[in-house]
Amino acid sequence: MNIPSIEESKCLLSEAGTHNPGPWVAHSIYTAEAARYIANKHKRLEPEIAYILGYLHDIGRRCGISYMRHIIDGYNFLSARGYEDCARICLTHSFPLKNIDSYSGNNDCNAEETEFIGKYISEINYTEYDELIQLCDALATSKGFCLLEKRLVDVALRYGVNNLSVLKWEATFEIKRKLEEAIGRSVYELLPEIEKTTFL
């Protein structure tokens, strides 16, 4: 796969955090850790690849505070470095439901970027890595791991809901079901101190 090493990924995220400090950096690290924990139990997923994809899924936030714009910024940033498989995750992680209108938050992309994102997610077939990071993004806060319900409500309170929100939540729970079927256990069993973070 066209992805950076773990060492380079850590350098990229550390640098990004100096450009735009915020809780998104810790969230990215927890997303990566969740992905590695789950991939360790999955026959078709490589833990190191899962970790890197999770680590850099929000790297577009290096460009500053934004909403949907961060996904295209991340895609462009990693594509320019030749990391196409990692760049792909920047676009797909926000869309467990393959509909651009399901995005949780404002669309601050221009018309051309919006068209590109919509076309991209509608035409590709999601891989198990796409779905893994979509799920882990919804299992991780900046303070640790939490139940899906807590994270989904947290996002809804911060960014609002729309007429596709429930369908997006259902898509996320379906990904959880499929991954749990593949690993033969609840993903919650794999995430340390999830009870503590959930009940903060």
Image (spheres, grey):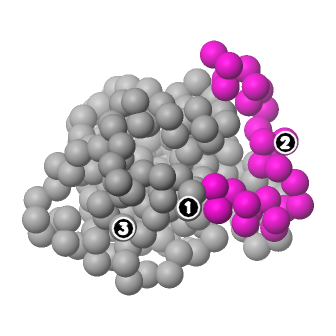
Please state which amino acid type lies under the numbered disc 3: Asn
Q: Is residue 133 visible?
A: no
Label 3: element kind? loop
To which residue does mark 1 refer?
171
Q: Residue at x 76, y 25 (%)?
A: 195
17 left or right of 185?
A: left
Determine which quarter of the picture holds residue 23: top left
Q: Residue at x 65, y 33 (%)?
A: 146
Compute the Cα span from label 3 to label 2: 31 Å
Please state which amino acid type lies under the numbered disc 1: Ala
What residue span does the magenta drawing correspond to? Answer: 173-200
- Residue 154 vertical placement versus 3 (above, below): above
Name of the residue lying farthest toward the top: 200
Please state which amino acid type lies under the numbered disc 2: Glu
Question: Which badge, 3 or 2, comes first in the chain's sequence?
Answer: 3
Name of the residue lying farthest toward the front: 163
> Which mark's residue is nearer the viewer, 3 or 2?
3
Compute the Cα span from label 1 to label 2: 21 Å
Q: Position of residue 185 (x, y in %)?
A: 87, 54
To which residue does mark 3 refer?
99
Callout 3: few (<14), some (14-19), or many (20+) C-alpha neighbours within 10 Å? some
- Residue 90 vertical placement versus 62 (above, below): below
Asked if marks 1 and 2 touch (Cβ < 8 Å), the reply is no
Q: Position of residue 127 (x, y in %)?
A: 58, 75
Callout 2: few (<14), some (14-19), or many (20+) C-alpha neighbours within 10 Å? few
148 left or right of 84?
A: right
Q: Is residue 2 magenta?
A: no
Label 2: element kind? helix
Question: Which badge, 3 or 1, comes first in the chain's sequence?
Answer: 3
To which residue does mark 2 refer?
189
Nearer to us in this view, 10 or 23: 23
Compute the Cα span from label 3 to label 1: 11 Å
